[in-house]
Amino acid sequence: MKVAVIGGDKRSVLLCSLLWQDRHRVHSFALEKAELPAEIPKAGCLQGCLYGADCVVLPTPAEKNSLINAPYAAQPLPVEELLSALWPGQLLIGGKLSRELCMGAVAHGLQVADLMQRRGFTVGNAALTAEGAVEKLMSASPRSLWGSRVLVTGWGRVAKLLALRLRALAAEVTVAARKEGDRAMAQALGLAAADFPDLPALLGSFDFVVNTVPARVLPAESLARLRPDVLLLELASSPGGFDPQEAAELGLTALSAPGLPGVTAPYTAAALMRDAIRSVIQEREE
């Protein structure tokens, strides 16, 4: 099978080798600045890379601001340019595909698979994100997690895994969640829990605050209640749980860590992608 890998970060670079090891014919585009094995040709043009490809693999996330997510590309690659170069019948696989990209792909006669709709992949990705978040907290603060008070906002996959990892490191973890059932589950797991309206009275006690909610759950008035030495970590996608500019104006240390699996564990993240792609291809063949 010919596989065209288009764009992406270190995960996509390593994925090329993993797919080649699976005996696929792998070609790449928009990875011009990456170091690839000699067995992985870098196509000189998009059409040449896509021609004859059975499967086209985009990164996770696939796009940013109507451009393919391609930090190693020699020049930007608009989503529309990619869609216009694809061939009917090709299988397009990527992570966090936008509605516009999916509709455009279907209109061009493609089969589409979003890795972020596959539970095995999303759970593994969440585990890597949680592990990477712990690493970020430990490396960016003079405090230990042991004995520290940590607020985790949200109760999705990443928040659950992160809260339990922090608890295992003897941090005192509070989970902020809107749903009563989510708070009850957090408490059943040995964590403290609070609703967002109750946070103002608690914010001054935390050493670390980690947001996983893609909505402004920590407005400026909430940030103002935090201690000056607190460390904020943003894991959610735009718009995020707090405004980094507001945090900076208050003298707070705030880190943004998008795409953590590709930063802290790119090989394992690439292997997750390879396994998910295998499953997609197998399902199509069946």
Image: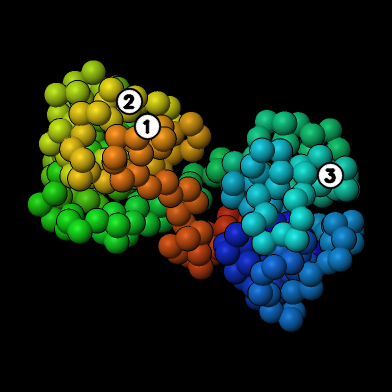
Q: Is 254 positioned to the left or the right of 267 in the image?
A: left
Residue identifier under label 1: 246
C-beta proximity under 8 Å, tags 2 and 1: yes
- The numbered dot on residue 220 is 2
- Residue type (three-letter) at the residue carrying disc 1: Glu
Q: Are marks 3 and 2 in contact (CB under 8 Å)?
A: no
For the residues labelled 1 and 3, the Cα–Cα distance comes to 37 Å
Mark 2, secondary structure of its residue:
helix
As rendered, which of 208 and 27 lies closer to the eye? 208
Query: How packed is label 2: few (under 14 Cα within 10 Å), some, or many (20 or more)?
Result: some
Q: Is residue 261 visible?
A: yes
The residue at the point 86 percent across, 66 percent down is 44
Q: Residues within 10 Å of mark 1 (few under 14, many from 20)?
A: some
Coordinates of residue 140 in the picture (x, y in percent): 30, 57
> Residue 166: percent from the left, percent from the top?
22, 51
Question: Which one is earlier in the sequence, the residue at label 1 or at label 3?
Answer: 3
In this picture the colour scheme is: rainbow
Labels 2 and 1: the sequence-earlier one: 2
Between the residue at mark 3 and the residue at mark 2, the CA separation in whole angstroms equals: 40 Å
Crowdedness near tag 3: few (<14), some (14–19) or many (≥20) residues, C-alpha within 10 Å: few
Amino acid at pointer 2: Ala
